[in-house]
Image (cartoon, rainbow, N blue to C red):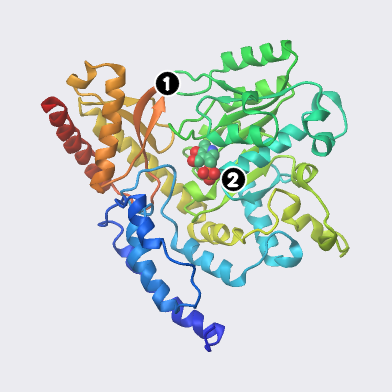
């Protein structure tokens, strides 16, 4: 160990890391967005023997600068148009450092009093934004996947008392044996894969998830949902939960939430809204009406590490009827965390509200993000991203070789490259062309966006999720699409 004091080490390393971070930020606009190294290339860089002797901080940081940063995916780039992954706010990046320095254990009040209080506060802000009343509460989670799992556990555990009035903790105590019929969960075929994983983890089985078809704009078909619920009920199953999506992963669209709320109510189902991405619309007076109905949800997933530019990882589950609902599903009192201090602190023990024990003080970066941006700052950014996406749409609509898919409801645009020669080819060939174009652009390093599958067909998908992205970046993207599309077409013709 160094003979320097801890404070001196922070001073020295802090300066060096500050330089690395600011240099990284300075080249974000010009550096390649994508990493070209293969797993074999990177294995060579990191395949070292177990370190026996310690290494100086300077040497470690030099290796970071040489081997780690240059091969990173440049998610913070204004030319990264990927999967709801944002440019992180500077205040959030430094909040992470402060969080690590304090190293609060946000699991129990006693191990992190300010962390518990700040988490409580940011959850209240999120609940207020979304239109929940004062009794709502929630918990931060590692991301949308965990947030969905937490919500679905509440849905599962509440299934017994809703129509039958049986003991509230029966499923917690006895598992699915407490049920005399299978539970079913409903979501559109566009739902995030974490919903399917969740029903599996919760012992209901992946087949218990009914993936309902979507309409031509990729919203859940409520007529088919109603039919499926009826069929399940007739077959002796218990419809347990309806999941609506606000900002679907592939298309960014929002399911008809008021209608889903009504179907859930009529069928004594829990209503969960996965607003991991689309929750950000709540900041904007102009766009928040798209979320109408979300306030009727029993639970909501809202990821600050998507449209709030909080560095990974930070998700949230919000519950309309408050912390008691979460505690009924998750509370436990281990001997070493159950000293009686008069009771008031227990409600700030976040290990009682979810799966995690030791928890990071993630509320800090969210709290600082809220304060730095303010509701207005977030609203302006969300509105600008939607405008930029509409601008992209207007540019694509001018190009006969590109065909747009669906409508813009958030900052996601899906489209296909279909010049005449490709349009005349088979669906499989058209799919291959989309993939080839996506890969050419990824390889160029000039931008990144993924492809996805919509109604069985491959499509290109662009999401604007960086506060650094400007019109000129969208223009460059359109130019890149044209150039690479043309080059691809020439290659196909010459084959
Ligand atoms: C709609 C939706 N829900 C949930 C998730 C899962 O979030 P995370 O990746 O933070 O676990 C995503 C991720 O993109 C998503 O798009």
Residue 415 vs 30, above or below: the answer is above
User: Which residue is label 2 attached to?
Assistant: 129
Q: Position of residue 329 (x, y in %)?
A: 77, 42
Who is closer to the viewer here, 254 or 228? Answer: 228
Left or right: residue 90 versus residue 104 is: left
Who is closer to the viewer here, 151 or 210? Answer: 210
Q: Position of residue 1 (x, y in %)?
A: 54, 83
Tags 2 and 1 touching, CB below 8 Å: no
Q: Name the outermost residue toward the left.
A: 494
Q: Residues within 10 Å of mark 1 (few under 14, many from 20)?
A: few
Q: Name the outermost residue toward the front.
A: 49
Left or right: residue 162 versus residue 76 is: right
Q: Is residue 302 visible?
A: no
Residue 194 vs 99, above or below: the answer is above
Disc 2 under 8 Å from ligand 1? The reply is no
Who is closer to the viewer here, 177 or 242? Answer: 177
Q: Residues within 10 Å of mark 2 (few under 14, many from 20)?
A: some
Q: CA distance from mark 2 to mark 1?
A: 33 Å
Which residue sits at x=45%, y=82%?
Answer: 12
User: Which residue is label 1 attached to?
Assistant: 455
Q: Name the outermost residue toward the bottom.
A: 3
């Amino acid at each position: 160990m160094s003979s320097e004091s801890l404070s001196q080490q922070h001073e020295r390393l802090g300066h060096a890391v500050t330089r690395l971070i600011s240099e990284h930020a300075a080249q974000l606009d010009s550096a390649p967005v994508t990493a070209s190294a293969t797993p074999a290339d990177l294995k060579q860089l990191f395949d070292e023997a177990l370190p026996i002797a310690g290494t100086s901080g300077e040497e470690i940081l030099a290796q970071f600068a040489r081997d780690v940063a240059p091969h990173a995916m440049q998610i913070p780039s204004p030319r990264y148009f990927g999967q709801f992954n944002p440019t992180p706010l500077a205040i959030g990046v430094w909040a992470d450092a402060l969080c690590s320095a304090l190293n609060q254990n946000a699991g129990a009040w006693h191990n992190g009093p300010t962390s518990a209080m700040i988490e409580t506060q940011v959850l209240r802000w999120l609940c207020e934004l979304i239109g929940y009343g004062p009794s709502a509460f929630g918990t931060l989670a590692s991301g949308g996947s965990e947030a969905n799992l937490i919500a679905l556990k509440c849905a599962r555990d509440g299934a017994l008392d809703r129509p039958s009035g049986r003991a509230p903790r029966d499923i917690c105590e006895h598992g699915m044996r407490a049920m005399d019929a299978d539970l079913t969960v409903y979501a559109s075929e566009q739902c995030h894969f974490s919903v399917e994983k969740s029903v599996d983890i919760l012992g209901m089985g992946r087949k218990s998830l009914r993936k309902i078809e979507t309409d031509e704009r990729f919203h859940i078909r409520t007529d088919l949902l109603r039919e499926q619920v009826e069929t399940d009920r007739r077959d002796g199953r218990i419809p347990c939960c309806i999941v609506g999506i606000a900002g679907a992963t592939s298309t960014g669209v929002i399911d008809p939430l008021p209608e889903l709320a009504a179907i859930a109510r009529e069928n004594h189902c829990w209503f969960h809204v996965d607003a991991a991405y689309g929750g950000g619309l709540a900041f904007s007076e102009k766009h928040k009406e798209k979320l109408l109905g979300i306030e009727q949800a029993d639970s909501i997933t809202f990821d600050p590490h998507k449209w709030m530019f909080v560095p990974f990882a930070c998700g949230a589950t919000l519950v309309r009827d408050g912390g008691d609902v979460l505690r009924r599903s998750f509370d436990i009192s281990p001997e070493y965390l159950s000293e009686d201090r008069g009771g008031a602190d227990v409600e700030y023990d976040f290990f009682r509200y979810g799966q995690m024990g030791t928890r990071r003080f993630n509320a800090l970066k969210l709290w600082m993000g809220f304060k730095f941006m303010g509701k207005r700052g977030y609203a302006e950014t969300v509105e600008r991203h939607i405008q930029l996406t509409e601008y992209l749409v207007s540019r694509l609509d001018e190009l006969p070789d590109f065909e747009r898919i669906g409508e813009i409801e958030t900052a996601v645009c899906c489209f296909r490259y279909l010049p005449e020669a490709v349009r005349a080819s088979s669906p499989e060939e058209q799919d291959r062309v989309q993939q080839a174009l996506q890969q050419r652009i990824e390889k160029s390093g000039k931008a990144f966006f993924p492809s996805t599958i919509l109604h069985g067909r491959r499509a290109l998908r662009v999401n604007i999720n960086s506060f650094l992205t400007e019109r000129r970046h969208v223009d460059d993207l359109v130019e890149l699409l044209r150039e690479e599309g043309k080059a691809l077409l020439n290659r196909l013709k010459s084959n």
